[in-house]
Image (cartoon, helix red, strand yellow):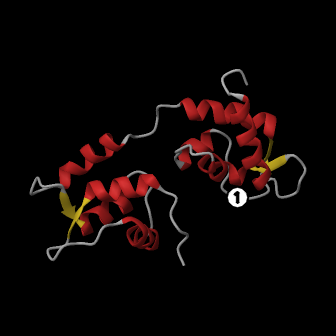
Amino acid sequence: MADLKSYEVEECRAAFEVYDTTGGGKIDCVFLGSLLRALDVTVTEDTVEKAGGTKAADQKMISFEDFLPIYSEIRKSKDMGQIEDLLEGLKVYDKNENGTMMGAELAHVLMSLGEKLSDKEVDDVFAACCPPEDEDGYIKYETFVRTILAGPHPEPK
């Protein structure tokens, strides 16, 4: 890949080998999103699916040589939101114009917009990333956004 430096290719190879569970030089496409995220690429499930990812195991395999162009293309994509975009979107819920919003409203947003989360997933996200609510149920949403985008976060128990 002309646009990838040799050290980037080696970093990709090392991460790819982690997901190559059979040692056959291919990974199951159900791991494509996880592999991309392990390489610090922020992707949505929709983007992963468009790139060839699958929702179930044993449907499709991909070689390292086939993965590199996918990685390169997705890495260059400008289809992901920036912190400023996310903060601007959450300002709609900032009724007091002081950088806070109701925790319940944030939960509602996470469960109803974009890639919808389940109640349990929202609880896990809040436990790992959400600053404590004040006595009126408000949270500082900028702290939340910066924490969640900083990742990685512990797996829920």
Report whether 135 appears left or right of 27: left
Where does residue 4 sit, x and y in percent of width and height? 68, 27
Report whether 6 appears left or right of 128: right
Residue beneath disc 1: 56
Asked if 49 appears above or below 147 in the picture, the reply is above
Report whether 38 appears left or right of 82: right
Please report the residue visible at 48 percent of the width from the left and 56 percent of the height from the top: 151
Please report the residue visible at 40 percent of the width from the left and 73 percent of the height from the top: 127
**Which quadrant of the figure contains the C terminus?**
bottom right
Please report the residue visible at 67 percent of the width from the left and 47 percent of the height from the top: 53
Asked if 95 appears above or below 43 in the picture, the reply is below
Give the amino acid type for the residue marked by disc 1 in the picture.
Ala
Where does residue 108 sit, x and y in percent of width and height? 30, 64
Asked if 52 appears above or below 30 in the picture, the reply is above
User: Extreme front residue here?
Assistant: 7
**Which quadrant of the figure contains the N terminus?**
top right
Please report the residue visible at 14 percent of the width from the left and 74 percent of the height from the top: 136
